[in-house]
Image (cartoon, grey):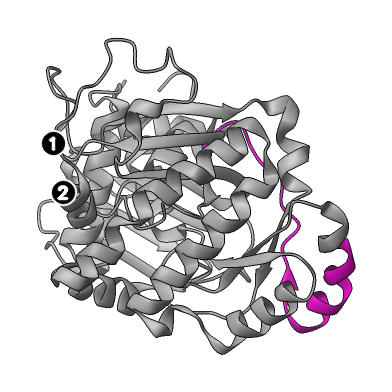
Amino acid sequence: MTLHQKLKKAKTQNKLPQITVYNRIDGPGSSLDLRLFQQSMWELGKIPSNPLRDKSMKWSIGYPRTIGIAINVGTEITAEPIQSGKLGVESIDFGFCYILDKDAIPPTKEHWLLRIMANFNLDGIKFTLRNLHPELKSAGLGGSAAVTTGVALLCNRLSRKPFSQHQIIGLASMLEQDLEVSITGTQEQSNAVFGGVRDYIWFPFGIPGTDNFFGTSIRQEIMPKKDYKELEARIDLYFALQRQSTDVNSKWYEELRKPSGYKLHSKKCSLAYEYREAIRTKNWKRAVPAISEYRKIRTKLCSDYMSDEAWEIEKMCRRNNAVSFPLGGGGGTIMVFSPSPKNLEKMRPRLSERFRHIDYKILAHGHKFRNISGF
């Protein structure tokens, strides 16, 4: 039975295959996963034969890294059969639907998801996308990258998994950026594949001495599932405005190419390490200077990173022993962190009057398949 025939049968049984792919909270380390940043900040060093033996991973200080926290905000993607020879993609929340001949899909921004499906040589299939939280658009939570990765994961599963996890991450990242959908790296993609609370150390050319691909990381789970509530109690999320991150990322790229900007950007690697250690050891006060200094560097490199809404939230944080951090490239969601949960509780009623408080949960997984057995 062909894949197309299996999908037709699944439709009659109301068991179409689905994937739900989840977004992330980043923080210090954000943007160090972008391809040019990985290449510019990385240099060959001595990597232990067992890099995870030392839980503090002191050997990795100075490497580009990002800390990803998977949350239950994301997108559901459903595969269904359409006419043979066609491929389709529809977004319920963004209001687009493209159905094209499978052998005539141009490499354009509008058709980036169709290009992934075509790369997997699928036929007669349409993917329908539905946001779990349709009100959260351009929120700085890595939504477009997560969707791209979700499409690649579902294509890979329907194609009997020809690609490895790291290859899926690299594939999704390169297609999204090279087709000019957004400036992206590998953190959202890695979060969608692995989930949990993880530290990702980036290897833009693959890990030396191994046979791998752009998108490869040495990763460490820095918080077990049983401790998620402790971190949730210290991080609040507020959706302040719908805002694209591309212009801010472009400015950071521009500054990276200047000696003064490169010097500033380079300071972020050690701050990202401090942030990961604060979470791993639950030394919550240690996170405050890492978050604050990282935000200051980003703002100095591009003042537009901090919107008026972000400044409003930051001013309240200063009065309540908390710190703020616009996620992604200054997208619409602002993280508010405090070592004391009581400070967040005190701020929450007033901030919720002005901004949308996101009631989230941390997840141990980055995606979830449904109705996939038999494919």
Residue underneath mark 1: 205
Give the residues in magenta: 345-367
The quarter of the displayed image where residue 333 is located: bottom right
Whole-Å distance between the Cαs marked 1 and 2? Answer: 8 Å
Q: Residues within 10 Å of mark 1 (few under 14, many from 20)?
A: some
Residue underneath mark 2: 39
Disc 2 residue type (three-letter): Gln
* Residue at point 52%, 27% (across, down): 221
Residue 211: in magenta span: no
* Residue at point 55%, 64% (across, down): 292
Q: Which of the image's four quarters has the N terminus?
A: top left
The quarter of the displayed image where residue 363 is located: top right
In the displayed structure, 214 sits above or below 260; it is above
* Residue at point 69%, 45% (across, down): 284
In the displayed structure, 140 sits above or below 319; it is above
Q: Are marks 1 and 2 in contact (CB under 8 Å)?
A: yes
Image coords of residue 45 (percent x, y): 18, 29
> Is residue 373 in sight in this rendering?
yes
Residue 359: in magenta span: yes
